[in-house]
Image (tube, rainbow, N blue to C red):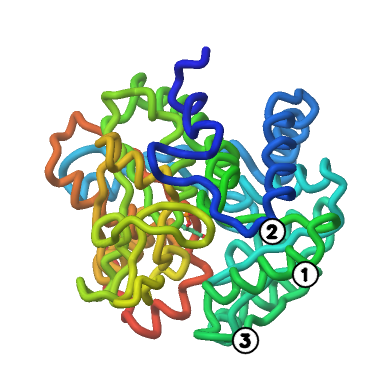
Amino acid sequence: MGTSYLETHPDEKGYFGRFGGSFIPPQLEGPFAEITQAYNELKHSPAFIEELKHVRKHYQGRPTPVSFAKNLTEQCGGAKIYLKREDLNHTGAHKLNHCMAEVILAKHLGKKKVIAETGAGQHGVALATAAAYFGLECEIHMGEVDIAKEHPNVVRMKILGARVVPATHGLKTLKEAVDSAFEAYLEDPINAIYCIGSVVGPHPFPMMVRDFQSVIGFEAKEQFAEHEGRLPDHVVACVGGGSNAMGIFSGFIDDAGVALHGVEPTGRGEKLGDHAATLTYGEEGVMHGFNSIMLKDANGEPAPVYSIGSGIDYPSVGPEHAYLKEIGRTKVGLCSDEEAVDAFYKLSQLEGIIPALESAHAVAYAMKLAKTLDKEQTILVNLSGRGDKDIDFVVEHHPIPHARF
Ligand SMILES: *Cc1c(COP(=O)(O)O)cnc(C)c1O
């Protein structure tokens, strides 16, 4: 023990190489140290592990299966494509993996309320779900522009009993929602806890959220072996903040023979503001309390970003992804809006699975990769979520192609 990658990364201060760390106002140092200490104790607590296992199995719907995408594989004519079905989680995506755990941690710390920001509303809905289940108050901060755009998720959060607080300053989107949520947390760090929605933010969140998401990779490794009797050759996941990708990568990171691919959105082009391909086009910088690779504008501020997948349009990326790319353990793949929509329809019509637009980026990249490989090779794709949330938008802007039959 002690030599596996996950046990030795990050270091005690939350660094993956030079990425990560904690850049927060002095008033938050106490509360964050409390969270770190509680997590370090809890992760070895049999009662915590038991409770998490119980809710995952009896409420959340885990384990989620690994499915062979036979028709998609035949259509691509190369490597075999398998899907880890995170779309089958309660609430339709992988986010509940860390939200349930974060709320158990909050309960353990005696907190009464969970606070978070949300962009498209997916993290807000998952956290509101977990808070309802465990009987905690939930307050979600969301930019006014996003509130107007993401109406169904706003209604869902309210039905689930959460309070949705509009962020009304600046561009009124995700960055302002983060500011607003941090302010609310600063007002009451005794009764409240901040629950970050990906492997981003100050230490310990990138580590904690990764560990909570690692269930995806550990399950997938066993399930894949049931199908093929060995490890996959390639593992593919889309990267926004990077939590679903770190989740599945965690199961294979010590297996040097398994290539790990994180797929970034090139959106509608290579110009700043037209994509959210942070690792590809970004530079080092501190944002939202941690050092990583980010997309900056001319003034060094977070640049505007864009992707058709609203859960992956983030101008920074989890520090561990910046590190793993730098040491050459992971590869960065790219996928445009157009390729994602094509994969969205192909997976729907060939496999009967409507993927989230975010997940469709991973599928599209896997389709390109499969064609370059031979039939004995295998690709495992993390299907991070289902696409029900996206159907109205997709059919309005991209007509349904003629079906195969
Ligand atoms: C939020 C979300 C993502 C992006 O978040 P990561 O932290 O990069 O995983 C990807 N897919 C779906 C379905 C999501 O809801």
Within 10 Å of disc 2 (Cα), the crowding (few <14, some 14-19, many 20+) is: many
Foreground: disc 1 or disc 3: 3
Nearest to the observer: residue 162 or residue 6: 6
**Picture coordinates of residue 250 (x, y %)?**
45, 33
Whether residue 379 is visible:
no
Question: CB under 8 Å between callouts 1 and 2?
Answer: yes
Sequence order check, earlier mark of 3 and 2:
2
Q: What kind of residue is marked 3?
A: Thr
Label 2 belongs to which residue? Answer: 127
Q: What kind of residue is marked 1?
A: Ala
Nearest to the observer: residue 370 or residue 111: 111
Label 3 belongs to which residue? Answer: 168
**Picture coordinates of residue 370 (x, y %)?**
20, 44
Q: CA distance from mark 1 to mark 3?
A: 19 Å
In the displayed structure, 7 sits above or below 122; it is: above
Q: CA distance from mark 1 to mark 2?
A: 9 Å
Q: Mark 3 near ligand 1 (CB under 8 Å)? A: no
